[in-house]
Image (cartoon, grey):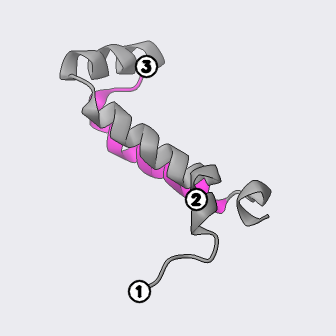
């Protein structure tokens, strides 16, 4: 196993940013998570699916800032 060649620019990748957002969301207290979910209209049971879809989109889009 080895790091990708541009690992120092990983923070520019959409998938890394989405993963960081998921970590921050997961570290919120449960009531705060519920408030955020109510605000955006996503049921708690769908959070893993929404995060997964966003992560896949983040991996598939062209990210020139990360490959410079």
Q: Which residue is mark 3?
A: 41
Q: Nearer the viewer, residue 43 or 19?
A: 19
The answer to which of marks 1 and 2 sits earlier in the sequence is 1
- Where residue 5 sits, quadrant-wise, is bottom right
Decide whether residue 33 is among the magenta residues. no
The answer to which of marks 1 and 3 sits earlier in the sequence is 1
Q: Is residue 50 visible?
A: no
Q: Would you call the spot at circle 1 few (<14 residues within 10 Å), some (14-19), or many (20 or more)? A: few
Q: Is residue 48 left or right of residue 67?
A: left
Q: What residue is shown at x 52% (from left), y 53% (from top)? A: 16
Q: Which residues are magenta?
A: 41-60
- Where residue 4 sits, quadrant-wise, is bottom right
Q: Which residue is mark 1?
A: 1
Give coordinates of residue 20: x percent, y percent: 44, 44
Overall secondary structure of the magenta section: helix
Q: Is residue 12 left or right of residue 3?
A: right
Quick check: marks 1 and 2 in contact, CB under 8 Å?
A: no
Give coordinates of residue 68: x percent, y percent: 79, 64
Q: CA distance from mark 1 to mark 3?
A: 40 Å
Residue 10 has which mark? 2
Q: Which quadrant of the figure contains the N terminus?
A: bottom left
Q: Would you call the spot at circle 2 few (<14 residues within 10 Å), some (14-19), or many (20 or more)? A: some
Q: Nearer the viewer, residue 6 or 32?
A: 6
Q: What residue is shown at x 46% (from left), y 83% (from top)? A: 2
Q: Is residue 63 visible?
A: yes
């Amino acid at each position: 196993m080895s790091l990708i060649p541009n690992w120092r620019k990983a923070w520019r990748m959409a998938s890394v940013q989405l993963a960081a957002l998921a970590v921050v969301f997961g570290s919120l207290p449960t009531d705060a998570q519920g408030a955020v979910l109510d605000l955006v209209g996503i049921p708690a049971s769908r959070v893993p699916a929404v995060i997964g879809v966003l992560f896949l989109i983040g991996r598939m889009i062209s990210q020139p800032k990360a490959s410079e």
